[in-house]
Image (cartoon, helix red, strand yellow):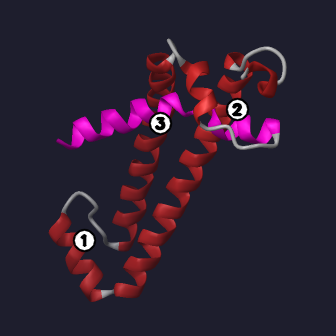
Amino acid sequence: MALVYILIWLFLSSRLFLAAPATIDNNRILTFETWKWTKGNMLRIAGARVVLLLPAYILVFALTALVGRGIGVNVFDPASSVAYAEASPAMFALFNGVSVFVSTLLYRALEAGLSSYLYQGLKPQGKAADVF
């Protein structure tokens, strides 16, 4: 069920992937207007996102596992993680907070860059206001 949800979210968000750069470029909110721009390109956009983010996810997870091992957290064993969190809640909160912050920062930066790049290629010629 989780895979179905992830795929639906990936495809839906890929259709709306150009909304942020279009909004910034045109100084007005363009959300569903960009839906037309991605028509026929949704699978390519989704594929580009997976190809870009999967290696980043693997790298971040590997670094998290290595740092976790260094402080005594086994991220592969939930029971061990819970035991560490109970024994040292402040250190576990710091480790988890930094891990989530770094991964979110990396993923958002990569997605923003890809979105901006694809916007340049998929936006209609001329001003967006004239297209609609």
Q: Are marks 2 and 3 in contact (CB under 8 Å)?
A: no
Whole-Å distance between the Cαs marked 2 and 1?
38 Å
What secondary structure characterizes most of the magenta part? helix
Residue at the spot x=40%, y=29% of the render?
11
In the picture of the structure, the residue carrying the numbered disc 2 is 116
**Residue depicted at 51% across the width and 68% down the height:** 98
Q: Which one is in front in this view, the residue at disc 2 or the one at disc 3?
A: 3
What's the distance in space between the residues labelled 1 and 3, CA to CA? 32 Å
Image quadrant where residue 122 sits: top right
**First reached walking from the N terminus: tag 2 or tag 1:** 1
Q: Residue 2: within the magenta?
A: yes
Element type at mark 3 = helix
- Disc 3 residue type (three-letter): Ser
Instruction: Using residue 6 as the reference point, say whether residue 78 is left or right of it.
Output: left
Q: Nearer the viewer, residue 102 or 118?
A: 118
Label 1 neighbour load within 10 Å: few <14, some 14-19, many 20+: some
Residue bearing the label numbered 3: 13
* Crowd tier of the residue under label 3, counting other residues whose Cα lies within 10 Å: few below 14, some 14–19, many 20 or above: some
Residue under the image location 54 percent in, 46 percent down: 107
Amino acid on which the number 1 mark rests in the picture? Ser
Image position, residue 57 (x, y; %) = 43, 43
Residue designated by label 1:
81
**Marks 2 and 3, the one that precedes in the sequence:** 3
Q: Is residue 34 left or right of residue 45?
A: right
Vertical side of 39 occupied by 64: above or below: below
Quarter of the picture containing the N terminus is top left
| As drawn, 109 above or below 37 | below
Query: Which three-letter amino acid code belongs to the residue tagged 2?
Result: Ser
Q: Magenta part of the protein: which range? A: 1-26
